[in-house]
Amino acid sequence: MLHQIFRYIYRRWLEPDLVSELKRRGLIVGANFKMMKGVIIDWSHCHHITIGAHVTMAPNVHILAHDASTQSHLGYVRIGKVDIGNRVFIGAGSIVLPGVRIGNNVVIGAVSVVSRDVPDNVVACGNPARTTSSVEQWVEKRGRELKAGPCFCEEYSVRHAITQSMRNEMNAKMATRIGFIV
């Protein structure tokens, strides 16, 4: 419990505010941007990146606006604008490459490589990322899972100091391996 309090204090007040520094360097970010641990936004070319409102980047996402692989062969580094629309979720471990536009209302699956534009209202996954369904179809499927699976309130989260017995209860109730938490 005490280590969780110290971790919260560090993250809340002591950890450098990376987004503020990137914005100072030219990154454009909309309201309600959530960036989880390990996200890397191209430090040296962040002024080529625009991120819309209500965007969440899961852990270890990389957003790149440059490609230095051309340096040794051409003498130049390839650069490209990256535009991420509104209401976008980018899954853990995904990479967004230079010159890409991700539309509005998009879900990018975990460990995807976004190497070309993604249109509005779709789910895209894979390497390279390809459209797998509409967001509407995806929400319907996940909604059916929500109705069938166990749901847990916020007290079951790390933010609320979940106990070992609560963890055990969650695992026991997830017979299908899938559940939901607020």
Image: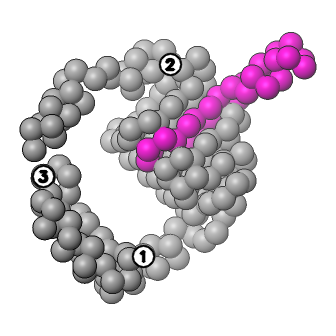
The relative height of residue 81 versus residue 36 in the rendered view (above or below) is: above
Mark 2–mark 1 CB contact (< 8 Å): no
Depth check: 172 or 23 in front? 172
Element type at mark 1: helix
Label at residue 142: 1
Element type at mark 2: loop
Measuring 52% from the left and 41% from the top, which residue is drawn there?
Answer: 61
Label at residue 112: none
| Residue 113 visible here | yes
**At label 3, which amino acid type do we have?**
Ala
Depth check: 106 or 126 in front? 126
Mark 3: give few (<14), some (14-19) or many (20+) Cα within 10 Å: some
Measuring 9% from the left and 38% from the top, which residue is drawn there?
Answer: 2
> In x, y percent, where is residue 81?
66, 30
Q: Which is in the foreground here, disc 2 or disc 1?
A: 1
> In x, y percent, where is residue 8?
18, 35
Query: Residue 24 magenta-drawn?
Result: no
Relative horizontal placement of residue 82, taking residue 153 as reference (left or right) = right
Q: Image quarter for residue 32?
A: top left
Depth check: 79 or 109 in front? 109
Measuring 20% from the left and 52% from the top, which residue is drawn there?
Answer: 158
Q: Earlier in the sequence, mark 3 or mark 1?
A: 1
Residue beneath disc 2: 26
**At label 1, which amino acid type do we have?**
Arg
